[in-house]
Amino acid sequence: MMKMNQSFLGKVCLLALFVIFSGAQLFAQKVTGVVIDESNTPIPGVNVVVKGTTNGVITSGDGSYSIVPGDIVKDVLSFSFIGLEPKEVEINGQQVINVQLQSSNLQLDEVVAVGYGVVKKRDLTGAVGSVNAEEIARTASSNAMQAMQAQIPGLDIQQSTGESGSGLNITLRGNRSLSASNSPLILVDGIEYGSTLDINSSDIESMDVLKDASSTAIYGTKGANGVILITTKRGKAGKTKISLNSYASFNSPTNVPKVMYGDREVQRLIDKSNYQSDVATGNWGSSSLTPEQVLTESLADFTEIGIYQDGSYTDWLDIILQDGLTQNYELAVAGGNEKTTFNLSLGTMFEEGLLKNDAMDRYNAKVVLDHKISNIFKVGTNLLYTYKSHDSRNSSVFGQAMKMTTITHPYTQDGEIIETPNPRYAAHVNPLMDEIPGNYQRNIETNRLFGSSYLEVTPVKGMVLKSTFAIDRSNVRDGRYQDYQSVARYQSPGTSFISSEWNSNTKYTWENTMTYDTDFGSSLHNMTFLLGHSMNQSVYEQTITSGDAGREHYYKSAFYDLSKIASATTTSKYVKQSVLSYFTRVNYKFKEKYLLTASVRADGSSTLASGNQWGYFPSTAIAWRMNEEGFLQNTNWLDNLKLRASWGVSGNAAIDPYETLQTLSSYPVYYYIGTSDITGNIPDQLGNKDLKWETTTALNFGLDFGILSNRVSGSIDYFISHTTDLLFYRTLPASSVFPTVLQNIGETKGSGLEIALNTNVVKSRNFNWDINWSYSTVKDEVYKLVEGVDRDINGNIAFIVGEPAMAFYDYEADGNWGVGEFQEYQTAWEARHTGESLGYSSTYGTPGTIKVVDRNDDGLLDDDDKRIYNRTPKHILGMNNSFSYKDFSLNVLVYARLGGYISYDYNSQLNFESANWADLDYWTTTNTDAKFPNPGSLSANHTNYGSSLLYEKANYVKIKDISLAYNLPRNVIGQIGLGSVKLYGSLKNFITFSNIDNYDPERGGSINFPLAKQVVFGANIEF
Amino acid sequence: MKQKLYISLLTAATLLGSFSSCTDFLEEDNKVGQTADLTYSTKSGIDGLVASCYVFGRAWYGKEAGLGLSEMGTDLFYSGYDNKQKSLNSYNLTAISLDDNSSDNACLDHYWEAFYAAQDICNNALKYIPENTDINETLKMQYMGEAYFMRAFYYLHMVSIWGPIPYYTEPVTSVITSAERLPEEEVYSNILSDLDLSIAAFQDAGYMTKADGRANYWAAKALKSRVLLYAASWLGETSISSNTNYSGKNLYALAQAEAEAVIGSGVASFYNNYEDTWSMNNEDVAVNNEAIWGVTYSSDVATPANCIPYRYKTDKSGKNLDYNSLITRTGYSRGGSAMLLQFVGMWNNGASDLGNNGKETFVRPLGESTFYIINIITGEKVYVADSYSKYGRGFTRYVPSLYLWQLLDEHRATDQRTEATLQEAYTIAPGLEGSSKNYPLIQDTAIYYCPLDGNSPEGQAKQAWAKNRYRIQFMANGDIPLFTSMNPATALPTESAKAVSDVYGDSRYNSYKIGGWCSFIGIKKFMENVYDPAHPTPDISSRDAIVLRLAEMYLIKAECELNTASGTAAMSTINLLRQVRAKAGQDNTLSGTATLETVLKERAIELCGEQQRWFDLKRTKTLVSRVKAYNAQASASVQDYHLLRPIPQAQMDAVTNLSTTSGQGFWQNTGY
């Protein structure tokens, strides 16, 4: 470690020397001027750049600029501003150049971030999608990644729980990997960040998604799942801007799964007893018990029959769920002059979850500074500090509330909590026990400093050398105190529990790039050349101390005082990973029409076995801007037409370190001999010295178009990807001791179609209506497993050659057996199979139990009777409507996800003895079409085949966001010194149409923490 | 200009190139992990490895799922109200791997994994002990003896559960995708060979006493005796052919010789008082007079000291999975034996008839000082922890069958074991006399399970006496019967409530909890019967699981004598044991000629609940007939093919040499 640091520092010095010696003083002469728009108003913030260099300035508040070009005769100044046509002016020795910019119809000159640089949209060769600052600012979530949902075709974002501060599941272009991660790489200002974006949403300038392999190959081993580039705002020269963004969000639970309540639960108990009585007599439908006969149980404070009679049932979910309030305040100050720009921001967020004591507070501070030392040297820094304190609830409480009977009371008449309120099952502890102050305390405190500094050198015209050093250091303290009277400890072991985890994660990245831009002295050619190097190391350390603290309340010292643990267990972890990379890229443009990009990256990773540590990732892409061709130049209705094709290879090595080594288990085992526990270490994994990258090769064909003065524009992309050497936790027979081993085996294939369409439906002086559509469809399949193996089954997860990569593999249920139905089935089957007999287990076929489809009709129920339930959605559709009328704007975002099965936990919420059921439709002699078995039936069939009832198609359409905003008229607010004031209100997640009742399938089957619907009020004020 | 450009490019290229020299940058730096070669070459490493050979014994012995697979679905037990393995008991068992389902799971898939992991640890020990230079030759021989013993021990379980099975003699270090099922005869040959190597090694090491819970010379002899009996009864008396030492020999004779040797060795002795065998004061196998060897549990029940290892199987991200909670019972933060919970019916939480929902009389004590009951007459606080702690938590998992109850009851007058085995009554804490609205005459007993027909005159008399004194539940019939009939072939635990009591005319028994599936006579052998104020009503115990004990040697000897000598000889051996178990001054002997039936009955009386019954019935091929005769919960389903358990579907799915023909490739056991 020490040795590495020294060599690391040494290299920093070497680079500094290099930079100093290669610099040279250049002759300077100034050009000034003013930039105005069509109405002759000066425009602040226009980019003025000496073409082919990164030498540029921004016009100040009065539209003026001053720039020192390299060559006052030959250089060309380019002026650009979002929403306006860019303009290029040859200097030709002039010292004053005033420019008028026309508003642009084309958005083609917006720049988008690509790896290690930016590219004009017009010059893109790959498939890239973007979300801009305005859309990002509309999110009201602690995770700014939410902004991208339904915005970019191919990007699938799902939120599975409503717990405060919870993460998102993000996949791009379906699933390729079976064991390695399928999450895209997320970079903030070029540095890997992670998928929970703890950044003020108003601090984000843009989010760009690199989708095709030619765009992602520059990220080599980490690029295979796509790359999301988050660019934060920097300062701009000109007037200092102060902006204040704040909102309050009122959150309430939505689509909460219902359990059986009250009379419905009573009926279940009756139907259960009736069934059991019918089984005993064999006389189906003869038993008709009354509530009085069934509700026999009681506790000290109530009797079941009494509750039935006065209807005083308990709705547990209603008791434990609450409405939450989120408050968010963001303050930013940005500005600067030609030489120095800055952007400072502070943010505070208080989020309340839907359960009591589930809350998160977050504080952000951000400093961005850029300074031009001279025309040659530029330095800058970007520091982001985040502090989070998250009080978390024991997630099992929700489950506890769902299975608790409703025929009970939570409190005694005196208002005391009844500790075990289920008269039928004493082991069920009252979920309210965790709400007694102090009984359950869990706090996760996170400190994170994320930042980078750079030195940029422009030694000669067109060449930029940049060295960036980034650090990401986070410390987390996760403390937990569970009182002996908390839900999880009450029954067993009846002692208090204290646990404290400390971990730190330190990452360094050092990146050096050189870009060289040239036109070879001819206006026909344009080439940008990139050469770069990156080294990256992370060290993770963790210590967990935990243990039993006896039968005492430690409400006050909670998890802070570890000396209260009677005999503490301490475990520690140390994980180091290093990656070393070299990369190069060429962007070549011929006649502004023919575009070529080619890149290659070499990555070395410490997680792989030596000999396999290095991987090489080439890519190439071409594009043809057809509308620039002579034969289309007179086609007036066509504004833009570009064909793109790309090919690239990218990798995935998102596996744990040390998998290549055959190591002993990090968990010691103990065995008591004589008078002591002897500690041993056993081998619990097979090391694999042959591990290497997983490699994805992808082809992308794209078409960008704009017609009718760009009233309709968009792009269509089709891709085919092929992943080989899959990193895969392969299932081995358990008889070979190690039932899983990580290997590079198998291949997957994927393909998909993505359409992004912008339609300007109405465009008039006061009223404007835009619809942005996004659509994607993706198909993936397991193409190959190991030689001679065509399936890998692990419970209900199976990888089968020719079948989707993400699928459940299970039986198919066909309702329940009716009275006498199985006998008919048996007779018919035996007639079909002379001399054979059915091999089902003995209780199979009982009326009111699951009927499983014997797909191959062989009289046995085994794996050959199972079917595939594809988890990947067939269609994902987003539609974002923006209406604006004068100073009002209205946004309506609709999101639909169709197809794809989920394993719905609700459908397993049936317990044959003691706990409450989900409100499921079960079989009785009078309700024979029900899906679920009778509560009185034997559990054996449900145990074996019940999982076939889990799968539901997760179709849903959601009106995710309705936002109404009002911009206060400028002439009004100008008088009180404000730049702009926007007031808005939103309804988020309010309306969901789903084929599953009372459920939001976005959650992917989980029922633990419901999602929130939000009413948001906010204001954006600029001074 | 051009020149400067080239210089810049060259410098940049050189600079970038210079990073390539940092090859050490990509080296893995594993500070916390350890490798086998390094660890096992040290003294502490090899000590730990040998100790680890035993650890998977804790997955089976003292655990709910292991108990289920070794006692359930036999003639001795029914499943109770909250049993988690009902489909196992009713033989509605399939090959499906139910993984972490803990509501109804035989856990065969997890045991399949656990036993293969366990034998691999033994194979590692057998590989690394001879290579270790930090320990002396004597200790090496002892350690080899232990490792051979444990490998034999695990394979005995595997072959008894599944029949032909894959067998390894070396640690697995590479990917194996197929599996070969070694015929049972060869597995038994290997087990016997391991035990002979173990015995020889222990002899060389001079490790011939039961010192500290490790396997030893006599433990190996005792296990060998059991293995020979299993082979003889299951495969045939001269069935072993692969192991030339046993080829053509009468295995019963050999088993008998080993049993006699152990009996004569003095390694174990009987307590005069049978109850002492089960006292928590004697729970340590190293201390228990009668124990020859067992699986130990540490007295440290609050830390992971008693936990079994994690599964070697991992999740999608490579993290080792947990074994099913029916096997770990308390997860991975603490552990112990779960036997104390399994045979206990509802006493406190089921006593809804005992006033204030039972709380007038019974509470489950969780803390010494805090748990008291207020006497409703005197109004005084009565501290109850030391009276009630031993009853434990009423898990209602296993109900002793009517057959077992009757068997134990038969010799109540002469045999200590009846009362030392059955939990027949729940008594109240001193100071609570009379403190019950429903039973105002209550003195000591609160619940009594009476081995009579409630309709018989004796039963009626008992009922009359019990009125207003305590709750009395009869074997069958009467006011609140435990079983549906007095016929062991058809009797089932009762399940329903009694709307109106015949005796009291009120609805005090109107609860499913009074049914025989919740409220039943328990087995008290495994109870936490010595009060420990630090752990009142523990839900996990440090009780060691006695696997081999002296009484079994007599029973093996007797069973062998049926074959090698005569039923008379067998009976006199049985009587030796019965005399030891006799109540003071009572003649507890049986007369006549012993048969296999006699041996099985005696085994039931002596060993019930000790995780042997299913194997005894299986190997003697009496499983189907006895289940049909004495277990109405399973009699409709049980068939001959159930003598082997299904190979877990996860294994079937993973092997590359799957076959549908028995004896070829990797096949499933018939019937599944």
Image (cartoon, coloured by chain):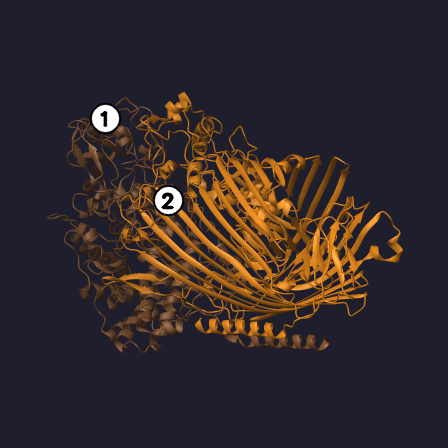
Residue A438 located left or right of residue B555: right
* Residue identifier under label 1: B438
Q: Is residue A34 above or below residue A761?
A: below
Q: Is residue A978 above or below residue B605?
A: above
For the residues beneath circles 2 and 1, the answer to whether they share a chain is no
Chain letter of the residue carrying label 2: A
Q: Is residue B633 above or below residue B165?
A: above
- Please tell me in which quadrant of the rendered image residue B502 appears: top left
Label 2 neighbour load within 10 Å: few <14, some 14-19, many 20+:
many
Q: Is residue B370 above or below residue B602?
A: above
How far across and down, in percent of the image, does residue B17 sit? 60, 76
* Residue identifier under label 2: A441
Chain letter of the residue carrying label 1: B
User: Is label 2 in a helix, a strand or a loop?
Assistant: strand
**Front disc: 2 or 1:** 2
Q: Residue at x 26, y 72 (%)?
A: B202
Chain A's colour is orange
Residue A163 located left or right of residue A600: left
Label 1 neighbour load within 10 Å: few <14, some 14-19, many 20+:
many
**Distance Cα–Cα, label 2 vs label 1:** 43 Å
Q: Residue at x 37, y 29 (%)?
A: A409
How far across and down, in percent of the image, does residue A1022 sit? 60, 42
In the image, the chain rendered in brown is B
How far across and down, in percent of the image, does residue A820 sit? 54, 34
Q: Amino acid at mark 2?
A: Gln
Q: Amino acid at mark 1?
A: Asn
Quarter holding the C terminus of chain A? top right
